Image (cartoon, helix red, strand yellow):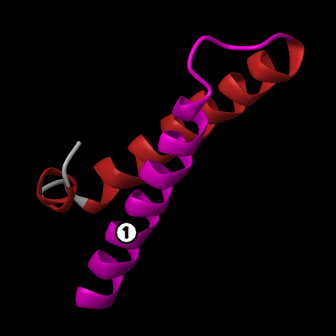
Amino acid sequence: MKNSEIQSFGLEELKSRLLSEQEALSKLKFAHALSSIENPMRIREGRKFIARLHTAIRLKELAK
């Protein structure tokens, strides 16, 4: 998802998306700990996407 798409979301939608992405990342990490996953780069992509969401949330909070 592009940054322009992320910034078009509302604050509540960003927060709910952040929670779901964090949950998905933890499940992915757990699956990788048990056995090797097909694409381990998805963990890095998930962390970066969560960071983008945190940044967008912070920008929206400061804009208020």
Q: Residue at x 20, y 58 (%)?
A: 3
| Main secondary structure found in the magenta portion | helix
Q: Is residue 60 left or right of residue 5?
A: right
Q: Is residue 15 left or right of residue 4?
A: right
Is 45 part of what is drawn in magenta? yes
Task: Where is residue 50? Give x, y as percent.
Answer: 49, 52
In the image, residue 44 sits, relative to residue 4, either above or below, namely: above
Residue marked by disc 1 = 57
State the count of labels: 1
Task: Where is residue 63? Give x, y as percent.
Answer: 23, 88
In the image, residue 9 sits, relative to residue 46, either above or below, namely: below
In the image, residue 34 sits, relative to residue 61, either above or below, namely: above
In the picture, the quarter occupied by the C terminus is bottom left
Task: Where is residue 16? Give x, y as percent.
Answer: 42, 44
Furthest-right residue in this view: 34
Q: Is residue 29 left or right of residue 10?
A: right
Residue 64 seen in the figure: no
Task: Where is residue 26? Give x, y as percent.
Answer: 71, 33
In the image, residue 23 sits, relative to residue 2, either above or below, namely: above
Is 60 part of what is drawn in magenta? yes
- Of 46 and 53, which appears nearest the observer? 46
Q: Residue at x 18, y 53 (%)?
A: 9
Q: Residue at x 51, y 41 (%)?
A: 46
Query: Local crowd at mark 1 within 10 Å, few (<14), some, or many (≥20)?
Result: many
Q: Residue at x 67, y 14 (%)?
A: 37
In the picture, the quarter occupied by the N terminus is top left
The amino acid sitting under disc 1 is Ile
Q: Residues in magenta?
A: 35-64
Residue 16 seen in the figure: yes
Element type at marker 1? helix
